Amino acid sequence: MRHKVFGKRLSRDTNARKALLKNLASSLIINGKITTTLAKARFARGYIEKLVTVAKSRKLSSHRKMASGLTNEALKKLVGEIGPGFAARPGGYIRIIKLEQRSGDAAQMARLEFLQWEKVPTKKPPQVKVVQPETEKNLRKSAVKSAKSTKAKK
């Protein structure tokens, strides 16, 4: 009996399971969809949906937690595109589609993919001109320049 036993083991030890989750999550975020076994897809779904929910918040501490479990490329895409794209959606960011059985061992295969998210344009900060403060030196220099230019015109 499996009373009070939480989660799946997938015939792996703890470190291998964590590595599998991180690799599946990074691959899905970078590529948008992956094909894996149904058991692995169901196992990874909750983890990835929690990552997207955390990515919707703009907190540095949450981004650092995500950085410990994702590659740099995946983290940038998750925080920059996917998280803000799902800002209006309360949950359910991933779809699992069942595919044919694998020919070698007849394992049930599935495709894990993100739903369509809104493409959020990246905002470039407006360019600001740097203006020097009006000090006495700057005022004197500008007065001298304007006096020279008026003399040259006459």
Image (cartoon, rainbow, N blue to C red):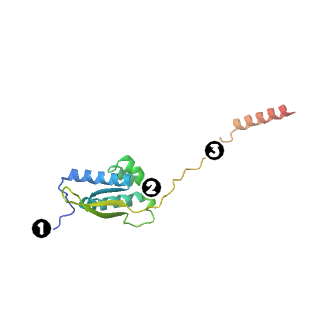
Q: In this rendering, would 91 be left or right of 137?
A: left
Marks 2 and 3 in Cβ contact (< 8 Å): no
Residue 19 placement (x, y as % from top left): 26, 50
Residue 113 placement (x, y as % from top left): 35, 60
Q: Name the residue carrying label 1.
A: 1
Residue 55 placement (x, y as % from top left): 40, 57
Q: CA distance from mark 1 to mark 3?
A: 70 Å
The residue at the far right in this view is 154
Residue 81, label in figure: 2
Q: Earlier in the sequence, mark 1 or mark 3?
A: 1
Q: Name the residue carrying label 3.
A: 129
Q: Quadrant of the C terminus?
A: top right
x 35%, y 53%: residue: 66
Q: In this rendering, would 56 be left or right of 101?
A: right
Element marked by disc 1: loop
Q: Amino acid at mark 3?
A: Lys
Q: In this rendering, would 87 be left or right of 40?
A: right
